[in-house]
Image (cartoon, rainbow, N blue to C red):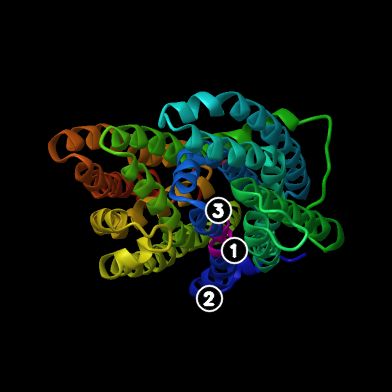
Amino acid sequence: MDQTFMKEKPVLPLVLKMALPMVISMLVNSLYNIVDSFFVAQVSEDAMTAISIVYPLQNLANAVGVGFGVGINAAVAYYLGAGSGKAANRSATLGIILSALHGIVLAGICVLLIRPFISMFTDSEEIAAYGLDYFYTVIAFAPVLTLGMAFEKVLQATGKMKTTMFCMAIGAVANIILDPIFISGLGAVPAMGVFGAALATGIGQTLSLISYIAVFLLAKIPVRLRLERRGEEKICRKLYYVGIPASLNLALPSFMITVLNAILAAFAEVYVLILGVYYKLQTFIYFTISGIVQGIRPLISYNLGAGRKDRVIGIFKVTLLLSLGVMVIGTILCLAIPKQLMDIFTDTPQTMEQGAVALRIISAGFIVSAISVVVSGSFEALGKGMPSLIISLLRYIAILPIALLMSYLFQAAGVWHSFWITELLSAVVSCILFWRLFYKDRTKRNCECI
């Protein structure tokens, strides 16, 4: 199949064509957590607190699946742009095999960690029971999740954004339909509570995986599963060179939330709930930008492989402008209707009031955070995993000492202020890194890449 449109079509229409399906996909994907949380919140506030506590470990499997998938995507798209079909085939094949192994290992590790993990944040046996019921079921589907991400990223590397959007939507719609049935019961189906929410999520992920595999086997795409006896170690190194930093980028929020939960729990459990609700809500905003970035990753990698560095710069600029627009909208919503947003997940007046304060403070950092997100994603597409990781370390690790200090000064409100302070710092560093490592040398024919 012909992918030359990636280096020939005008930049703005091309970015919109590639990014829009991914934005829709990411928004639909965000419904997994939002819908689960909405229906779980109907069970009780303790149930909602429980899934907020286990969210960091749950996110770990997603981080590894998507992060390593980014490495697969960058390698496949780069080799297609460079005209090396065999290397693209081997990258896809090894990526899919390794992704399945990652899911199995993650499931085993997380099962061992979950009980002591929950005990760090609550003494309530009821909350712990809810958390275990939910988590054991969700993590059992980790291999399905990581394998699905691998197939998705291979297809995206060939430009099939609408196809992956459709496959992802199949799973999300199934989850939306099954959630109320499994949680509350319907007819012959008994009420299963939080276990039902987790089961609905797993079934949705399985349906998406089946769809990806069917497309991969039946559709005409320029990548096939092929292994050779030589050169596989080199391909693996390239996959992990981008995949490990990208996975860490996505896993760092889990570590950050864990530490912030510990800080907030010292004041009251309600703040843990508020932080959990915030992370459910912010997925709509950040998943939109993530969708845009995922859409342009294969474009950047392909044009880099084709030697079109001028187009790489053009794609970056358009992506940044679109992302800034999304963040402006997110900021306005959090400032204008914070109580209504909190009301989706709780009907406790005190929780809504304190949650509204948190949303208004945290949203102060939304607009500048677009810079860090776009620069980090662009570095991954360029094969520069370490600069991307540095940006993520600033966003998700530097916030911890800031939050600790601010909490001593302003209690829980200090933790909310630490978000915008950290985003501002990260944006400044991101601009410096992008200028020094890529933009400054844009007149050169080639740059260091995967």
Examine the image and state in which quarter residue 330 appears. Answer: bottom left
Residue located beneath label 2 in the image: 13
Would residue 64 appear left or right of 213 to someone viewing this image? left
The x and y percentages for residue 2 are 73, 66
Q: Residue at x 46, y 61 (%)?
A: 284
Which-is-in-front pick, marks 3 and 2?
Answer: 2
As drawn, is 231 to the left or to the right of 287? Answer: right
Numbered mark located on residue 44 in the image: none
Q: Is residue 133 above or below residue 113?
A: below
Relative to 399, is 376 on the left or the right?
right
Q: Which residues are magenta?
A: 25-33
> In this picture, is 94 found above or below 152?
above
Mark with earlier residue (1, 2): 2
Three-letter amino acid code at the position of disc 3: Leu
For mark 1, what is the residue?
Answer: 25
Say which quarter of the image contains residue 394: top left
Residue beneath the point at 64% across and 42% down: 138
User: What's under tag 2, amino acid-wise?
Assistant: Pro
- Residue at 53% over, 65% down: 23
Instruction: Give the main secondary structure, helix, strand or loop, of the magenta stretch.
Output: helix
> Is residue 117 shown above or below 174?
above
Q: Compute the Cα span from label 1 to label 2.
A: 19 Å
Label 3 and label 2: CA atoms lie apart by 19 Å
Label 3, label 1: how many angstroms apart (C-alpha)? 25 Å
Asked if residue 248 shows in the view, the reply is no
Q: Amino acid at mark 1?
A: Ser
Q: Which residue is mark 3?
A: 304
Q: Nearer the viewer, residue 78 or 443?
A: 78
Outermost residue toward the right in this view: 218
Displayed quadrant of residue 133? top right
